[in-house]
Amino acid sequence: MPKTLEGSTTAGTNGGTMKKGLIGIIVLVVLVVLVGMSYISARNSMAVKSNQVDAAFSAIDVDLQRRADLIPNLVASVKGYAKVETDVLTKIAEARSGLLQARTPDEKLAANDRLSTAILPLTRMQESYPDLKSNQQFMRLEDELSGTENRIAVTRKRYNDAILDYNNTIAVFPNSLWASIAGFKQKNGYYQADPGSKAAPKVDFGS
C-alpha cells in the first residue's frame, strides 16, 4: 500500500512539472509572437513614412525642374528689351546649372534659393524698363515662375513635415530598437534657407 501511494505522488509531481513546462513554452511562444508582430508592425510603419518623405521631395523636384526650364525663356524675353549685364546672366546660368546638377534634396533646395537670388534682377527690370510690362511673354513667364515658387514653398513644408513625422516615429520606444535592427536612421534633410539667398544683388539697369 505505501508503494502505491509513493507511485501516485511521483506521478503527480511529474504531471505538475510537465504542466508547468508546457505553460512556460506557451508563454514563451506567445511572447515571441507578440515581439515579432511588434517588429513587423513598426518596420512597416517606418518603411511607409520613409517612402512618404521620398514622395514629398519628388513633388518638389518636379517644380524645381519646371522652374529651371522657364529660366532660359525669361532671359530671352528680357534681352529683347534691355541690355542685361553679363555678370547677371553669368550668375543666372551658374545658379541654374547648380540646380540641375544637384543630387540630394538639401542640395537641390539650396540651389533653388541661389537661383531665386540670381534671377531677382530680371524680375525687377520692369521698374527700369516700363515697356516690359506690356510684354505678354515676360509677364506670363514671371507669373509662371511666381506660381511655381509658391508651389515649391507649399511642398517644401510638406517635405519637412514628412521628415519630422518619420524621425518622431523611429525615435520612440520600442520603435527606436526596431529601427536600429532594421537599419532605419534619422533623416537630416530638413529644408533651411541658403544663407546666400538672403542678400539680394544690387544691379542698376538704368546706368
Image (cartoon, rainbow, N blue to C red):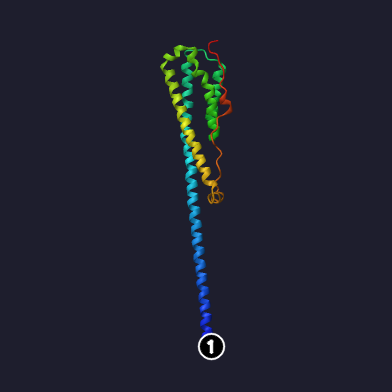
Vertical arrangement, residue 163 with respect to residue 26, above or below = above
Q: Single out the residue that lies furthest toward the bottom.
A: 1
Q: Please state if 199 lies on the left or on the right of 30 as rendered.
A: right
Front residue of 194/5: it is 5
Three-letter amino acid code at disc 1?
Pro
In which quadrant is the C terminus drawn? top right
Q: Residue at x 43, y 22 (%)?
A: 143
Look at mark 1 in the image and give the residue it sits on. 2
Image coords of residue 145 (percent x, y): 46, 24
Image coords of residue 144 (percent x, y): 43, 24
Q: Residue at x 46, y 12 (%)?
A: 130
Q: Residue at x 45, y 30 (%)?
A: 151
Q: Residue at x 48, y 49 (%)?
A: 44
Image coords of residue 116 (percent x, y): 52, 24
Q: Please state if 64 lies on the left or on the right of 202 as rendered.
A: left
Q: Single out the residue that lies furthest toward the right.
A: 195
Front residue of 59/75: it is 59
**Could you tell me which secondary element the residue under label 1 belongs to?**
helix
Vertical arrangement, residue 95 with respect to residue 59, above or below = above
Image coords of residue 27 (percent x, y): 50, 64
